Image: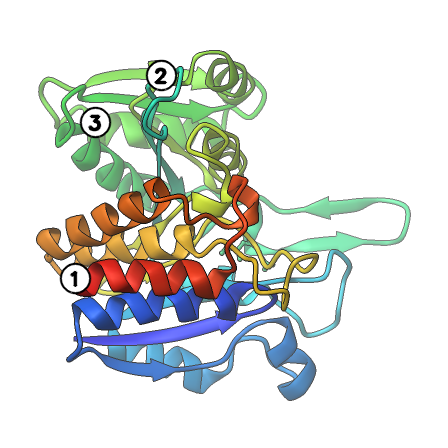
Amino acid sequence: MKLCVIGGDGIGPEVVDAALAALLVLLPQLEVHHAEAGWQTFVKQGVALPQETLERARECGAVLFGAAGSPAYKVAGYRSPIVELRRSLACYANIRPTTSPMGSARAVDLVVVRENTEDLYIGEEASDGEVATALRRISRAASRRVGEVACALAASRPRRKLTIVHKANILPLSDGLFRDSVREVAAGYAGLEVEEVLVDTAAYRLAANPAAFDVLVAPNLYGDILSDLAAAFGGGLGVAPSLSVGEGCAIAEPVHGSAPDIAGRGIANPQAALSSVALLLDRVWQQPALARRLQAALADTLASGVRTPDLGGQSTSAEFTRALCARLQA
Ligand code: GGG
């Protein structure tokens, strides 16, 4: 087994180090390759996703990625490394589960499946300083393949329910194509309950009654936004994991970004990165028992009161990681 580890920017390297420490307790024979990407890489090397990083990731077949912190203004020659990585590795479906913590008032157990390779994220923008445009791409092929992942996932869960999110009343050609393509795929899954919801209504219903959802499938931008919203019911962005899957490669990656405000302070919550690794163990490396062991150790560590400040605790990331690894070794 090989893993390409890319810390990225901000708290990315901190949470990735913690997840790797736990992973090496579970899989001491794991072959680890470190590689660079991100804004800081761009500043140093003039490229945010170096070719050698891409080659290393391909060779390993599995990536643990921390976070990218891209500037919110145009920088010549810069493209988001994580968007580029997902696209280049054809990791076309981003699986983002949310499960409410034990004892929550609302029992939420949902998964957002986000299309990962197109939509507005193709980055084709133009501006003359007065008017700016951004091209949005939706294709039947990309919509069908993410639909396939979402349908298979929904069919494997007890509720067998799929919600297709779109805005086809305003964007009938693009969002209509997404909706129709996913519906075509879903027609091949007997016993699947399929509904479609406009993205604005989906946002309202998620906020009002998240327990009503099972698996949601959405184009890239809607999936990005709705999964952050859903994360609020799972204990926050500090604990929200993701796994991007596709053609022979996978990327485990926390949903959160680089959090520059807390970077370097040693207080980042590594839980999202750890749970992303659990997804990798379970779904890609076919090690469900190890994934369960990691999740159980995480739950026990939290129950023992060891928590980072975002969860109301006083532990540093290193203290949390040490406590977790001790439980894994016990
Ligand atoms: N781990 C997910 C992550 O880095 N999220 C922040 C994000 O989406 N960044 C895009 C970018 O900065 O290029």
**Front residue of 214 and 172:** 214
Is residue 84 visible in the rendered structure shown here?
Answer: no
Identify the residue under disc 3. 186
Residue depicted at x 24% and y 28%: 184
Q: Are marks 3 and 1 in contact (CB under 8 Å)?
A: no
Image quadrant in which you'd find residue 91: bottom left
Colour mode of the rendering: rainbow
Where does residue 52 sit, x and y in percent of width and height? 42, 87
- How many angstroms separate mark 1 from mark 2 (CA)? 35 Å
Say which residue appears at 18% left-offset and 67% top-offset.
26
View quadrant of ligand 1: bottom right
Residue type, numbered disc 2: Ala
Determine if residue 6 is in view: yes
Label tally: 3
Question: In terms of sequence position, does the residue under pointer 3 or pointer 2 come before the other?
Answer: 3
Residue on which disc 2 sits:
211
Q: Position of residue 6 (x, y in %)?
A: 44, 73
